[in-house]
Amino acid sequence: MIVPVILAGGSGTRLWPLSRDMYPKQLLCLAGERTMLQATVARLSGHTQTGAPLVVANENHRFHVAEQFQQIGVVPQGILLEPVGRNTAPAICAAALYATAGGEDPLLCVLPSDHYIKDDSAFHQALDAAALAAEDGAMVTFGVAPSAPETGYGYIQKGPPLARTTGAFAIARFVEKPDKATAGEYIASGNYLWNSGMFVFRASRVAEELAKHAPAILNAVREAFGRGRRDLDFFRLDAQAFASCPPDSIDYAVMEKTAQGAVVPLEAGWSDLGSWEALWQAGDKDHDGNVTTGDVVLHGVKDSLLHSSGRMVAAAGLSGHIVVETPDAVLVMPRDKVQDVRHIVAALKAAGRPEAGVHRRVVRPWGSYETLILGGRFQVKRIIVKPGARLSSQKHYHRAEHWIVVHGTALITRGDKETILQEDQSAYIPLGTIHRLENPGKIPLELIEVQSGSYLGEDDIVRFDDDYGRDRQGGA
């Protein structure tokens, strides 16, 4: 049995303003009706040798990740939470320790949660070849057959074929991202593949290789795992121990050093969707070469990507451009400047602007909220609470709240008094009052919240009881 290990801890800000620190690209629908994370899981559904997935995610995304699995009816065998990002080697090490904790030693198929693969059947065939090689002790990676002299990927040079496994080759060497001329020479030779960042190996083998080549990583993750704890449906790695782990990729820590490296060529329409240019390349284009999403009106536009999240986007006379609209930001740039998005995000972070990290609509385990108006001493929000869900019991030191129900039914607790509110009814929560909001009905509860006070930040929350195990103080 193969255990899929889904790496879902990245931030993906190269696809800003859609992808942000607190809601990264693996949680978005970028290439179809499923999110990237859901598509990664669904890709394995037709492969009979794979079991329930094991997920490694950032603790800030834990409720988003859990909800995405609920939406597709898949129960992961575990969701490991990283308190901080430490690259792929520590994440894979934690997954290997988790997979072997019960005495089993399965093959692991490590898959980033933000890759696009067009041909699932071709991927399954490559996975079968990789599994056979891994059964013999190989540390296998998938090498994508290059379609162009791409300078944004690392390359793998194929060595001789493995004797016992059809379709697998020894790794001659890894090559850093080349210039265009060198990349062209690699493709002409027919002996080089793009490094995909997907792997297959036995759980105990990756621990052995880490012990040999990166013992500091293995020791730190072992301590973080040993001191970890279960929290609802999650397993939290110890924050202090994991933070002390050296950050490194599995490529640098193991794959470039092991004597057992192998590569399986993959021709399945793969892309890591790591930029707006990659998304344009992978998208379905109209007769003018445009990829469009949402309410888009065009005239004389060619070879461009235009994305509307809500408002109509109209464009005329553009060629080779990216235009992305969200409720709080609009991005416009030439396609050949997509790497400059990182400078925009860096400038937003330096200025302390929330658009770098969060969307206007913020998802919580109980539902969501969206800021409609923000003034000097007041704020208006739209709040949606899922059926049967409730917010924490809490109070605020600096603000009062006024709730108006516009859809559904609300159960309001103020102090020791409970009140049922229907549509067009309202309630006032004075500053300092312990209160709770709950949806007792079977349809979503929608209300408008008007906050007033001297400070309106999300950290002005003191929790007394919470269904989701969140900290006593912090965001809703």
Image: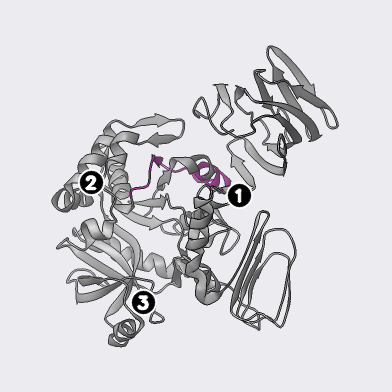
Q: What distance separates the C-alpha of mark 1 from that of mark 3?
A: 36 Å
Label 1 vs 2, first from the N-terminus: 2
With 355 as the anchor, is 370 left or right in this view?
right
Query: Seen from this angle, which residue lies furthest top?
Result: 416
**Marking on residue 145:** 3
**Marking on residue 373:** none
Highlighted magenta segment, given as a residue range: 65-86
Residue picked out by circle 2: 217
Please tell me which residue is depicted at 68% across the width and 11% down the height of the picture.
416
Numbered disc in front, either 1 or 3:
1
With 120 as the anchor, is 68 left or right in this view?
right
- For the C terminus, the quadrant is top right
Please tell me which residue is depicted at 29% across the width and 69% down the height of the picture.
264
Mark 2 Cα within 10 Å, few/some/many (few <14, many 20+)?
A: many
Nearest the eye: 349 or 44 = 349
**Marking on residue 359:** 1
Tell me which amino acid carries mark 2.
Ile
What is the x, y in percent for residue 360? 64, 48
With 400 as the anchor, is 186 left or right in this view?
left
What is the x, y in percent for residue 215? 17, 46
Q: What distance separates the C-alpha of mark 1 from that of mark 2?
A: 34 Å
Tell me which amino acid carries mark 3.
Ala
Label 3 vs 2, first from the N-terminus: 3
Please tell me which residue is depicted at 76% across the width and 35% down the height of the picture.
447
